Image (cartoon, rainbow, N blue to C red):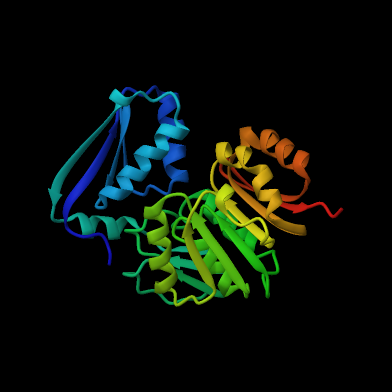
Amino acid sequence: MGIKEGLVYELHISGLSEEHIDITSAILGLLEVEAIEVLESGLVIYHSDQNFIDHVQSQLGTMATWLEADQLSRKERQNENWNKSWESSFDAIIIDDFCTVKATFHNIENKTKHSITIDPEMAFGTGHHETTYAMIQMMERLDFADKEVMDYGTGTAILAILAELLGAKHIFAFDYDEVATECAIRCVSLNNCNNITCDTAEIAQTDTTVQYDIILANINRHVLLTTAHEVYARQKSGGELLLSGILESDFNLVLDKYTSVGYQLDEKIQRGEWLCLRMSKVVG
């Protein structure tokens, strides 16, 4: 598919302090926004899919509570060179000797154990952001063979696809956003996966009678904190939970919440200011 030439949609975020520029940039990174321009007092996001811009604007309203409606404005323009400039800025990601994440237009020799193809038009989880990168690193340390896996907030299904490559028996990949789910379905097909079920849902709407050996949750602090009990209710005793999308400054908040509902911390890794936690549901 690729980024199509033609209309480019822009979301302008204006009137930001230097601190809020940094925080908003971090949020946009978590949302896997690849095309961002930093201005003196704001940011501009570019994408060829209007639905993706809608998704980002909706998420900003939830995650950047200081933003006022008049600080967000939309524009569109013609850009015949968009596809070329996008492709030139989208590099393949090579995570140790473990996993390569590449776009459909990359022609590179695969030298890692696993390879995932993500179309950058589906910009919900490309592996570029520290949170996704760290999740992939942590997944290498888990045994997925014949396991039941939940991918909570799946985006492009990049983590679900990797779970299948690592031998998972079945992966339930879901997202509350229909656009993200559509992206996930296309990426699952692109990677010829057969053991992944994609759906649009909130976690509270999912079946509590199904228990998962491994739960993957690369989301954000607010969602992780408000849905800890729902996560716990869907995990097998002794099961493993990977959490990401956590700023270093929020570590104790998330840790306290998940230990209070019945998890223990087994390991954490850090990339930049972002943390990925490996936890297990306490047996008992």
Instruction: Name, please, the residue furthest toward the right.
Output: 284
Where's residue 24, x and y in %?
42, 33
When the figure is inspected, residue 276 is found, relative to residue 13, above or below; the finding is below
Where's residue 52, x and y in %?
32, 49
Residue drawn at x 84%, y 55% is 283
Q: How many marks?
A: 0
**In the image, is 239 to the left or to the right of 47?**
right
**Front residue (pair 241, 19):** 241
Residue drawn at x 54%, y 55% is 133
**In the image, is 126 to the left or to the right of 1?**
right
Report which quarter residue 186 is drawn in.
bottom left
Residue drawn at x 66%, y 43% is 228
Report which quarter residue 57 is drawn in.
top left
When the figure is inspected, residue 155 is found, relative to residue 147, above or below; the finding is above
Where's residue 77, x and y in %?
14, 45
Report which quarter residue 247 is drawn in.
top right
Residue 34 visible in image: yes
**Front residue (pair 57, 34):** 57
**In the image, is 229 to the left or to the right of 41?**
right
Where's residue 266, x and y in %?
77, 51
Quadrant location, the N terminus: bottom left
